[in-house]
Amino acid sequence: MATPKSVAFHTLGCKLNYSETSSIGRLFEDAGYSEVSFEGGADIFVINTCSVTEFADRKCRQIVRRALRKSPNANVIVVGCYAQLKPQEIADIPGVDLVLGASEKFRILDFVDNLSKAPGKGMVQAGEVKEANTFTHAFSFGDRTRSFLKVQDGCDYKCTFCTIPLARGSSRSDTVESVVANAQKIAEMGVKEVVLTGVNIGDFGNGTEVIEGTKPKKEALFIDLIKELDKVEGIGRFRISSIEPNLCNEEIIEFVARSERFMPHFHMPLQSGNNKQLAAMRRRYRRELYTERVALIKQRMPHCCIGVDVIVGFPGETEEDFLETYRFLNELDVSYLHVFTYSERPNTPAAEMPDPVPMQERRKRNEMLTILSEKKRRHFYQNHLGETRLVLFENSSEKGRMSGFTDNYIKVDLPLDADAINTIQPVLLNAVNADGVMEVLENEAVRG
């Protein structure tokens, strides 16, 4: 009997990519392939790429080289956003055998059998992004603690800095019934937490049109979805990965405040605290609306964790513009920042805008907001010292330790108790260590 071919995966980028990699892995498994560790070498390597930053593009090249060092004769397949945006550029990377676009990646097995028969290297199968017009459901399954469940894909927004519509196509959603069925499968696997992912999950159904009042409701919206997921037995926690502030309306906030399963944790991209930049970015709100959303969340859930995406160095951002963003964020009652240094992306309007910010200045602004983020995170953690909160325990990268997150996304670290892994238990929060993590002594963890 022949030994089954082995396949290894490497994922770059967002939680959505992780959910899709896992689903592609199950396609290979169902076809009789053996999934192995990337570091151990394989017959086939599948690299799922991101293209949000220049770093992600360079990272793809590094991963290809790393794969071929492990297995020089392996076939290398590249999928994902970078593959859709620059397929020929990837095909020209030495060692790449196959590049699949957005509408082809879930048909990967249709192409794999022909790899050994194809002459040369770098075969491209990437149609126009408009062909990516159907929804393919996906969810991740790895450590049994947490699963990323895809509910939406693509985006109809026209933010001037963003390549995602070019890489993933127009906005489209799963059905409520399909998402609930996948959540039930995840529950049967023993997973305790589900993170809902997508490019613009608040647009589920025709959410933007309804919330902004331009069209009547045509199908189930995101609020309808989370109400149904709240009824799924066996999942202890749901998290909303990221939601646009214009779509995070009062109804969603009120629902999360009342729910025992949807965690008090919102991640809302802001991108700039300056209305001049928000207009140039073509964001669908101004900072006043963002302030209102944060205030409502904190009014209904004072303990809620709020994360913020922000871009520094956007074209035309003066020193005073940036300082206005800094002051706005400093005064805003949020818990942490994800800071991105603006990088020019081909075929986006922002790349052609005048008055680019020097790279050295962009990096300086990033550093200032990164320091502010750490201060805000520590302040948020310290505000909860002395409380007992529920933690989902998982393995730590440090030997003899385990970690986890509270309901409101405070990371804790404590001595390993193997029986506690993948369980949700109350813990007394008593100290923030030098790394900014809530450290809990074994005898101060609450059992019961």
Image (cartoon, rainbow, N blue to C red):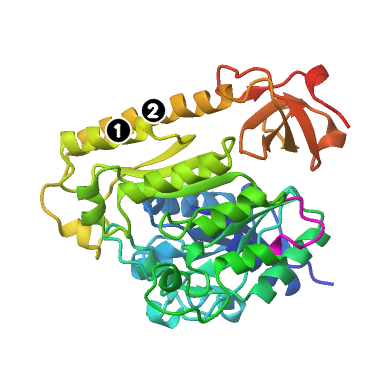
Determine whether, in the image, residue 117 is placed left or right of residue 86.
right
What is the span of residues highlighted in magenta in the rendered image? 229-237
- According to the picture, the residue beneath numbered tag 2 turns out to be 372
Query: Left or right: 148 with respect to 422?
Result: left
For badge 2, the amino acid type reads Leu
Q: Is mark 2 on a helix, strand or loop?
A: helix
**C-alpha gap between disc 2 and disc 1:** 8 Å
Up/down of 135 relative to 307, above or below: below
- Secondary structure at badge 1 equals helix
Q: Which amino acid does label 1 sit on?
A: Tyr
Q: Does the magenta stretch include residue 231?
A: yes
Query: Measured from the top left, where is residue 227 in percent x and y?
Result: 66, 64
The image shows residue 227, relative to residue 102, as above or below, that is above
- Residue identified by numbered label 1: 326
Magenta stretch, overall SS? loop
- Image quarter of residue 443: top right
Determine whether label 2 and label 1 are within 8 Å by CB: yes
Q: What label sits on residue 366 in the rendered view? A: none
Report x, y in % for residue 185: 78, 66
Residue drawn at x 25%, y 63% is 348
Asked whether 121 or 262 is in front, the reply is 262
